[in-house]
Amino acid sequence: MIVEIGHYALVLALALAIVQGLAPLVGAIRHDGALMAMAQPAAVMQFLLIGMSFAALAYAYVTSDFSVVNVFENSHSLKPMIYKISGVWGNHEGSMLLWVLILALFGATVALFSRGMPDDLRALVLSVQSWIAAAFLLFVLLTSNPFARLNPAPLDGRDLNPLLQDPGLAIHPPLLYIGYVGLSITFSFAAAALISGRIDAAWARYIRPWTLGAWVFLTLGIAMGSYWAYYTLGWGGFWFWDPVENASLMPWLAATALLHSAAVMEKRDALKIWTIFLAILAFSLSLLGTFLVRSGVLTSVHSFATDPQRGVFILAILVFFIGGSLALFALRASALKPGGIFAPVSREGALVLNNLLLTTSCATVFIGTLYPLALEAVTGEKISVGAPFFNLTFGPLFIPIILAMPFGQMLAWKRGDLLGAAQRLVLACALGLAGMVVLYALRGGSVVPAILAGLAVYLTVGSFVEVYGRLRNAQNASSFFARAKGLPRSAWGTAIAHAGVGLTLFGLAATGWGVERIVSAKINEPVLVGPYEVVVTDIAPRDGSNYKDLVAHTQIREGGRVVAEMDPSRRSFTTRTMVRTEAGIVTLGLGQVYMNIADVRIDGAIDLRLYWKPYVALIWLGALVMSLGGLLSMSDRRLRIGIAKRAAARMQPAAAE
Amino acid sequence: MRFVLALCLALLPSLALAVQPGEILADPKLESRARDISAELRCLVCQNQSIDDSDAALARDLRMLVRERLKAGDSDIEVRDYLVARYGDFILLKPPFKMETLLLWLTPFAVLLAGAAALIAFSRRRRSEPVAAQALSEAEKHRLQTLLGPDGDKP
């Protein structure tokens, strides 16, 4: 019964979404306050209905109701509770339900936290948002119904794919989806601005917290996914340039570009056309990602052609929203007056350069991801585009971005002083170069890691030079801290987020200094890896609820002393008769010892893969620091409720000129 | 006891890890060449993994094949060509530069150049615009005339 209520709630949500798509739109065009006012309660109600529906599916999973096809196919009564819950979105139907739930969550958030916004803008935003919701609700109901029943109900389920039975599944998809779907709000804002024709600096300020929020979650989601791959896939790789990863990287690159161009629009009323275009592009890439992941087109063009229902549906949604918004864009863009003028060497100029490079790198990922599909569809020829292609094209594009980042912070708006900026960055450059030389001398090997690590030092130090410049005239420590506190949070946000990129880069560079040992070792036979000795002391079986482990108790020693212990294992899942390796990972400082066991031989020796990965934790810590920067920027005073309204009021006479 | 345990393990569905100790060549130079080559070859039955990273049986066979060719004295390019002849371009993770992949390799540069060109053109136009917009109105010209006197425009 609860399952049917969930299904029904979803149908009601669709009906409501259609109303919410139409009424406020008509209201905004006719200046009818009553119709516009429908948007807010409808958005909140829509979220509650989809929430009910989601809760109903979660209930079916938690109670192991195998009369529901979706639960039968993806769950098992013995599965640990955390995976029963996260299993809700560990499959196509459930993950699409999570998608629409988050979409509705964002709609409801706009409805509740937009008091400072003009009524017609809010009505239009919620209307566009609801169009997207309606399209995807229709998709779920028609092609991916998670509530379908099975009669007679089987005794037990088929269990979730063992690779997905991991805490990563509980965290990664929700984070990533919040980021992905969060970009729908910026899209709705862009479409609303195009419909109303009012595109000004105040608009750029409204979208800022939403873009930042989506960006923060996208950053966390990608980092989390990367760490998940790192510890599950068994050899410590963390980024594969896999189409599914690229599908999330493209919106991230577009959102990063959007954040920076929106800053120019907000401060200087320039780059308006471009910013609107990026807002459309970012969400379009999210939709494209959804299409790539959900249609099955990636596995093979042919498997897509044999069961095209879902793919074609998402493709239709894609074409409708991207095509519709671009048509609106084409209609309105010519009417937009370019705003503030700036010299090529200026903060604006630096941000334009950032946008050029980020968009180009995004285009590179795009073509690399879709080219094999397109080529196979057109000529039938199969090619692979993998890591070597992206390292060769994407890599060089990111170097100038990194070099330019500290300069961008240092240049003044309108007209900057490049030489002055360079002088203030002398220390950062010197430290970077010193880092290159010292690290090369210490580590040896190829020059590439040392060069990249030096760049990372330059970027991390350089990120704080601008903030330091504002503080260095402080007389004493207490005035220093008072000034530091008084700086706008967005200044700190920029510095910290940029430094985060530096940290991640350092972690990436350091992979070049990693040590790998692939050996057979006997019990108590030490194996050297980097500065450590690794010893397997014992092998023993261990039972889990729906799996059996074979654990290798392992000690890590340094100079004869045990510094850490770990338990890498081989895990056999009973229901799906599948084996998975569980890596043993120990973090020592910023580096990690990473170990996997394979076959145990008759003579008792074990095949091991052992790694010492210096500074590897920085890759993900850097992403956390980036997100922290984003959150700080979000909490900036000027973005809080009420302040935006006063700013908009000040903006109005200027717009009328 | 340990023997029994090992026997149980041997009966488990075998899970080969990527490169295994038994596969490694005695000559470290040759082995490192083999690793570099393997990293750029696709495991044909996997989603997007190189044969160096993959646990699949086919990847293992291909790794052995690469090492056999190297031991037989092939150069890196000969090994790659040998595999392409057998499996087609699909096995190369870095697609070759040829007619069919022209668009793939050139797009990044084309986008960068087109973007830069558009920016330069745009900023040129912008720089010439304000001048036109700031031309003096008739009233201003008149006022300038009166300020400068009748000989104002003939220095």
Image: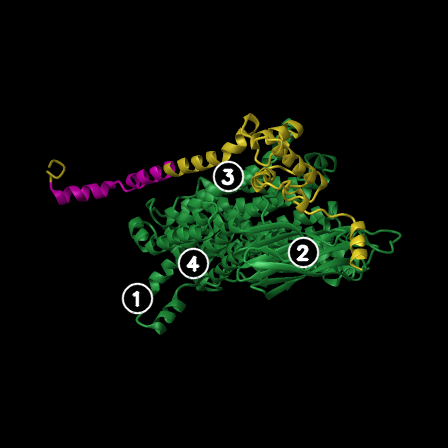
Chain colours: A green, B yellow
Q: Which residue is mark 4?
A: A495
* Sooner in the amino-acid sequence: mark 2 or mark 3: 2
User: Visible in this render: residue B18?
Assistant: no
- Chain for numbered disc 1: A
Q: Secondary structure at mark 3?
A: helix
**Magenta residues, start to end:** B121-149
Tell me the amino acid under the disc marked 3.
Leu
- Mark nearer the viewer, 3 or 1: 3
| Magenta span contains residue B144 | yes
Q: Are marks 4 and 2 on the same chain?
A: yes
Tell me the amino acid under the disc marked 1.
Asn
Q: Which residue is mark 1?
A: A473
Q: Residue furthest right?
A: A152
Q: Is residue A433 above or below residue A484?
A: above
Q: Secondary structure at mark 2?
A: helix
| Magenta span contains residue B85 | no
Residue A136 versus residue A390: which sits nearer the camera? A390
Tell me the amino acid under the disc marked 2.
Leu
Q: CA distance from mark 4 to mark 1?
A: 19 Å
Q: Position of residue A158 (x, y in %)?
A: 81, 52
In the shown orientation, is residue A290 left or right of residue A470?
Answer: right
Residue A119 versus residue A5: which sits nearer the camera? A5
* Sooner in the amino-acid sequence: mark 2 or mark 1: 2
Q: Residue furthest bottom?
A: A478
Q: Secondary structure at mark 4?
A: helix
- Mark nearer the viewer, 4 or 3: 3
In the shown orientation, is residue B140 left or right of residue B85?
Answer: left
- Chain for numbered disc 2: A
Q: Which residue is mark 2?
A: A169
Q: Which mark, residue A392? A: 3
Question: For the point 56% across and 52% down, which residue is it?
Answer: A185
